[in-house]
Image (cartoon, rainbow, N blue to C red):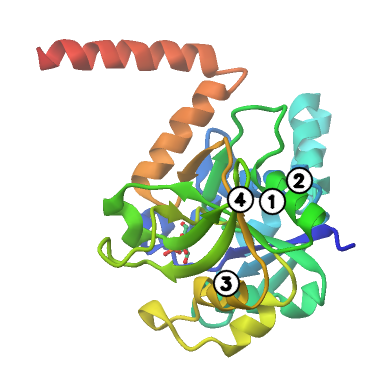
Amino acid sequence: MKQVKKAIIPAAGLGTRFLPATKTIPKEMLTLVDAPIIFYVVEEAIDAGIEDIILVQGRGKTAIEDFFDISYELEDKLAKDGKMGLLDRLVRIRNMANIISVRQKQPLGLGHAVQCAQKVVGDEAFAVLLGDEIMVRSNFKIPNTTGILVRHFERNQASTVAVMQVEKSEVSKYGIADLEPLIAELYKVKGFVEKPSPTDSPSFWALPGRYVFSSKIFSEIGQVATGRGGEIQLTDAMDSLAKKEIMYACTFPHERFDAGDKLGYLKANVELGLCNKELGADFKDFILKTAEKLSSTKK
Ligand code: G1P
């Protein structure tokens, strides 16, 4: 029985949707409340039982690995100043995961980024979490989104990916799944299309960037032709795999934000700000007052 203990986090994109902020800072390092986007993604993987995180990075992205490494000077200063709460937090972050870094030397697409981690994964099952997609947990009694996929994989021993419903006008932004309902939140996958036009889309079930695969996905990635945008698309490899062996898709009850997009990033900050134990109450007060002000200026 295969277990899921490794996760690949592709984080090699150039962040062009977020320029000029991402000219010198990787988009995965932009802050959500008080931690970078990538922290929330790694935390989701660790909470789902993942032990090894394989970061697929491009040039100039070493700030991401450094964030999960020790900072002697800082820790020493915090200890001397008696700031033990902050020190504990930094120590927890550097101990939270075994981070393995691999390079994607050319931006050849998401499928290619996943393939760059093949040697580290070997023939194990693994999760993929896109480094700029945030899942805010709405119910702590239910596993997080990656945790739900891991549970299904370990029960069924078959690749399982997360899906969410989107508006017709949004399908061309996502990989879209063709599904057959099974039980409750679980579907059997018939196929996938990367970013179809609304008229050609097989459904409104979109891929939000959370996947668990058997290692067989690697041979499919190795065989797919260059796809949409001249890139090796993960979605095309998933389509081939789903036509050869059973693959599942499942929904999740958590809130998802595309934090690599300006509006998605602002929304994620509001959501996480409201959930924050220290700041949430004051922030909510501010939001309500702002909303009141906006509605009175509208009248
Ligand atoms: C990628 C995937 C797409 C997926 C999306 C989720 O596209 O190729 O299938 O639905 O992430 O955000 P990108 O947003 O990198 O263009």
**x and y percentages locating residue 266 in the rendered image:** 39, 38
The nearer-to-camera label among 2 and 1 is 1
- The Cα–Cα distance between marks 2 and 3, rounded to whole angstroms, is 22 Å
Q: Earlier in the sequence, mark 3 or mark 4?
A: 4
Report the residue marked by disc 2.
48
Q: Quadrant of residue 10?
A: bottom right
User: Please, what secondary structure does the residue beneath circle 4 have?
Assistant: loop
Specify whether 83 is left or right of 130: right
Label 1 to label 4: alpha-carbon separation? 16 Å
Which numbered disc flags the more N-terminal residue, 2 or 4?
2
Nearest to the observer: residue 78 or residue 6? 6
In this rendered view, identify the residue nearer to me: 18 or 20.
Answer: 18
Numbered circle sitting on residue 288: none
> Residue 9 at x, y = what percent?
64, 61
| Residue linked to disc 3 | 238
Contact? badges 2 and 1 (CB < 8 Å): yes
Q: Is residue 181 above or below residue 14?
A: above
State the residue position of label 1.
149
Numbered disc in front, either 3 or 4: 4
